Amino acid sequence: MADDEIGIAVLGAGSIAEYHLAGIAAAGGASVRAIAARSRERAAPIAARFNVGSVVTDWRAALDRRDIDAVVICTPDDTHEEIAVAAAGAGKAILLQKPMAGTTDACRRIIAAARRADVDLQVSFMHRYFPEVAWARARLADDIVGRVHSMRIRNATPGPDWSDWFYSRANVSGGVVDQLGVHGIDLALQLFGDIADVGARTATLLPTRTLRDGRVVNVEAADTAFATYRFERGALATHEMSQVETRGCDRFRLEVYGDAGTLWLRSERGPVAAYAPRHFGADWHVPALPQAKLGEAHHRAWLAGVRDRSQRLATAADALRGMQIVEAIRRSSAAGGATVAVEARVP
């Protein structure tokens, strides 16, 4: 980089682009110098709102610019591999929106391209950086709930109504599991260790959807999935994924049950609550959490790795592992819910 300020291009101008733009602004030390979108008219308002001086209609033009050191890729899922491989070849650091890609083979090709080019590759798992998750991670390390024996994970929304590509199997092959479920899978892997086997059923419960612009689209991929996980440490989990709930949940809900206590995240008790009598007495403990702008901690961590290779995170390997579990869900559902082993993790 020519100076201390990291030059960034955001590729894609959909709803998630705003999260990244706001997070980069809050983190500081970087400048978004271009937004790439298929429609200049669609990108212009968001560019103006975040003081981005350039809008291009071909993402390749952003990769050609010498003042851009890194890219955020938040385009439809089926485009991730092509764009990420090209970005690596252009020497750009990469923050790639989840899911990393639609298959484990595609994930491996992206990782290989980043390694060849020696560029930082990160996959965006925003939930990791929420204050309640950080608090829960630290308390689990302190063993406040004892041995964890079961958990319940929920990722549920009414489903996106602003674009049709979410419901196309060509764009999102795994449907709700790829779009929402990967968030819960990543949290589970981060907090509770590896998953050994999976049982799952998936279904398409709403075969057509009406978008906010009035278009009616066919739903080609699963919009509902229920999975059970057995962790290598012996704990069991249920994971509910839905794009058909009228209200849904607040990004996610996570309930953790141990032999010495209970931990709830994003429940009716607030962002996080713990029932752990040995530590907090007989009542539920609801801690005060630090306040931060959405995306600030996430993008600060990413930018630290762009500046200093010793600060790089292993989110690409984590995303590959998550996709191995997604593929196990697909295999189990195709086999009528039979328990299937997750492919062995490759170092």
Image (cartoon, rainbow, N blue to C red):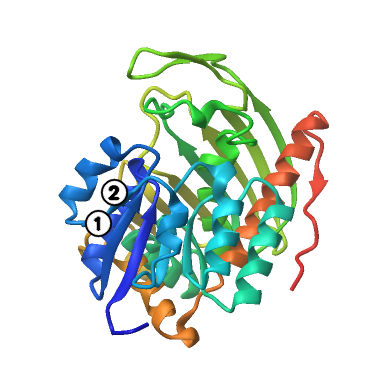
Residue 276 in the image, given as x and y percentages of width and height: 41, 62
Mark 2 burial class by Cα count in 10 Å: few <14, some 14-19, many 20+: some
Q: Nearer the viewer, residue 84 or 246?
A: 84
- In this view, 114 is above or below 261: below
The kind of residue tagged 1 is: Ala
The kind of residue tagged 2 is: Glu
In which quadrant is the N terminus drawn? bottom left
- In this view, 88 is above or below 199: below
Residue 212 in the image, given as x and y percentages of width and height: 33, 19
Residue occupied by mark 1: 22
- In this view, 340 is above or below 104: above
Label 2 residue SS: helix
Q: Nearer the viewer, residue 302 or 116?
A: 116
Q: Which quadrant would residue 108 be assigned to in this image?
A: bottom right
Q: Residue at x 79, y 39 (%)?
A: 331
Cα distance between the residues tagged 2 and 1: 6 Å
Residue occupied by mark 2: 18
Q: Nearer the viewer, residue 190 or 288?
A: 190
Q: Residue at x 26, y 36 (%)?
A: 41
Is there CB contact under 8 Å for labels 2 and 1?
yes
